[in-house]
Image: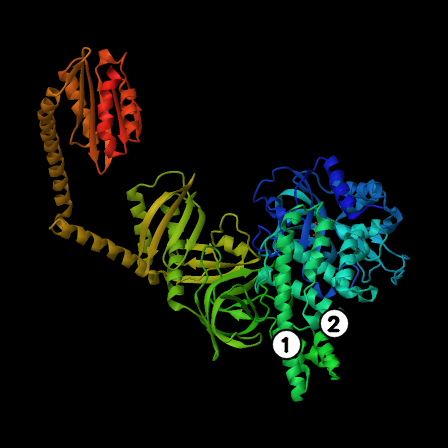
Amino acid sequence: MMTGNELRRSFIEFFESKKHQHFESASLIPEDKTLLLTVAGMVPFKKFFLGEKKAPTKRVTTYQKCIRTNDLENVGRTPRHHTFFEMLGNFSFGDYFKKEAICWSWEYITEVLKIDKDRLYVSVYKTDDEAYSIWKDEIGIDPTHIVRLGDEDNWWAAGPIGSCGPCSEIYYDTLNMGKNNEEINCKPGDEGDRFLEIWNLVFTEWNKKEDGSLVPLPEKNIDTGAGLERVASVVQHKSNNFDTDIFEKIIKSIKDVVNLTEKDNTAIRIIADHVRAATFLICDGVLPSNEGRGYILKKLIRRAYGAGSIANKEIFNKGETFLYKIVDSVVETMKEAYPELVDKKEEIKDVIRSEEEKFAKTLKAGTELLLDDITKGVKIDGSTTFKLYDTFGFPFELTKLVCEQHNIEVSEEEFNKKLEEQVQRSKSSRVVMSDMIKDEFISNFYKQHGETKFTGYETLKDRAEILHISKKDEDTYEMIFDKTPFYAAQGGQVSDHGVIYNDSFKATVKDLIKKSDIFIHYVTIDGEIPSVGDVVELEVDKDFRAKTMRNHTATHILHRAVKEILGDHVNQAGSLVYDKGLRFDFTYGKVIDKETLRKIERRVNEIIQKDMKLEVTNTTKDVADKMGAIALFDEKYKDIVRVVDIVGYSAELCGGTHCPSTGVIGSFYILSEQAKASGVRRIEAVTGFGAYDYVNENRDLLQNVADEFKTDVHQLQDTVKKSIEKNTELEKEVESLKDELISHKISGIISEKKDINGVSLIVKKVKAEQKDLKTYIDKIKNKVDNVIVLLATVNDDKIGFACGVSKELTKKYKAGDIVKTVAQITGGNGGGKPDFAQAGGKDVAKLNEALEKVENILC
Ligand code: SER
């Protein structure tokens, strides 16, 4: 019987034999910022599927640690649910496709694992005839074992947008295997647990866009996932994943440490699952907190602790810690596949123990409160039990336990009612776990509420109902309403700013994103946190919107103007429209001269002055084409498009917000024009008061410069020109004076020369700039034959050396060597040619000593 470790190994080896490269399991913290946790084997490869990055190799196989928390309540109560699990997978990035994926999965299952073929069933996507016939004709599966299923079961997507495709699943029939699941007439995909899905083969070939359209991915890919725990249960003939060897040591440890038996199986399994998840989360760097992943970890530890203390009252009464002791068994079981656990073991235990201690204290405080109430004779009703749960994380069973010890009855029904009320009231502000960003959330939200109605074309102020609120991080909340006047960044235009408020709170809107037509508002909140169902006022910042709108309409005019002036072949290649200005990228291969740029700028201003009307119509793409509306390069449009028409000048498909007429823009001013990429130019410009302010700043600057020159602005150019000429003249004069000065000085220097073995040696400290030393040396060399000159100068505590050697001596003496030797004595260095070289020195105190050494070089 294959163990979990053997299974993992055999899977990887099998796919290695099919030329796959084994990649290590990636961290539970995905690189992909839209996901909180690694939820599937394909997560680390999303970028390869989408073609955002080239895969380093085309065939990959992995066993990937994963965590999913959507079925938390079921964990431990069903045979199959886990938070932490491992996914075995093989992936093709633009290499093999359906046929190989299907054939290899079958070969592995039937020939390596030797699973009984008669118990295998498969499903294919309802219209996927290709997969159907591979299963039927190539593999030879009995057609009664193949089912066609719809979107719900056999379409796999990593989220509402992004890579996706039809899938084919392999099921194991557990009929008559000792379970109460003899639903004879059911088939895969039906309710019930007769058919166990063991492997999902996804044929990832589509990219779903925001507007719902499916665009083929650059390449066809394969993503498969087989849950290790499930496959292990099949090969080990166990009807419950927790009965496989993967959990054996862990469960034994739980029984020993917590002192539990078979009758406590649910608690044991909850603990086993959660301790595994917590161990791996901490190993990947997550720490308990109130946010995101940290909150998930905290919740898992607390749930496991709760399960243990309900099952063993001693633990509860004494506030003991126990979970951390189970970590050893997790590490022991998993270390072969995840050796990093071994090094981190003590750290993991510390983190778990300290969270347990904190929770034990919380439970104690809650119990005291409860006992206080009991002594005072306060009725322990639904509100109390719920408050204990809500504020202290007290599982209901614990409250019940304490009450029972005092012969007080509590109603579970009342507790559940309160819990349900809270869930309804705010799905919500107490849900600190930000699952907002997860595509899965958006998809469910959309199913329930449909799209957010955008009212921001007609109004800047609206009243709407809160449909969702959650906390994203320390300061930011995410809010969704039934409608909103806030524009969400799209088509180059940035999101609106503004406020949301009612009598008891005020939120400032920092940003928005639109996902699948749902507008998510990112806000900071002052005052009370509002609840789902509250009706609030939404008010867009008028000034911000007006500025943005001017820049957007100006961008349309600019787009038309560049076509008019540079040619119709010029196209928009991107844009950014915000309150402070606009950026417009367009395809054009040449530099645009100043005059042409001026022409473009002037043309835009002309259109502004003509105060042309803008008309917005929603129409079909065909009609829009007939209107000559410009559709942007690779954008995809829905059936009904929005045309923004500057009547008589330009029409563009656009979802943005615009001025009622061009005159509102006021004025337009180009700040810069430059190359953005090869064949793409970028113009940056400002409008309205932005243009006015820019011109004003320049006017002030000009005036200040004129003041400095003590002239007026009109004379400035002339004055500056004259001043430059004067300066050049003066520089020349300085140079010639300096030359004279040097000539004068070197007579003195030469008079100090020494004759050593027929060589004239001059060593001298001079007051000069380093750059002038060469002139000194050249002049000396012109006057004295057979000479070696070494000059030093000190400026700002730094020494500069220069050495010159007459040509006829350079065979024997090298300026580079001499200057280097000397400079090194002062802690510096340098070098150069044999007849001239320079160096820098550091220690001024050693300068004299260094200069004295020069003579030695000659002796
Ligand atoms: N991504 C697919 C799944 O999670 C197959 O690996 O089921």
The answer to whether mark 1 and mark 2 are in CB contact below 8 A is: no
Quadrant in which the C terminus appears:
top left
Q: What label sits on residue 654 in the rendered view?
A: none
Name the residue nearer the viewer: 223 or 656: 223
Name the residue nearer the viewer: 15 or 624: 15
Residue type, label 1:
Gly
Name the residue nearer the viewer: 707 or 24: 24
The answer to whether residue 811 is above or below residue 847 is above
Element type where label 2 sits in the image = helix
Q: Which of marks 1 and 2 is in front?
A: 2
Query: Residue at (77%, 63%) from the top-left corner?
Result: 268
Ligand 1 near label 1 (Cβ, under 8 Å)? no
Mark 1 and mark 2: Cα distance apart in space: 16 Å
Q: Name the residue under label 2.
A: 313
Q: Mark 1 points at which residue?
A: 366
Element type where label 1 sits in the image = helix
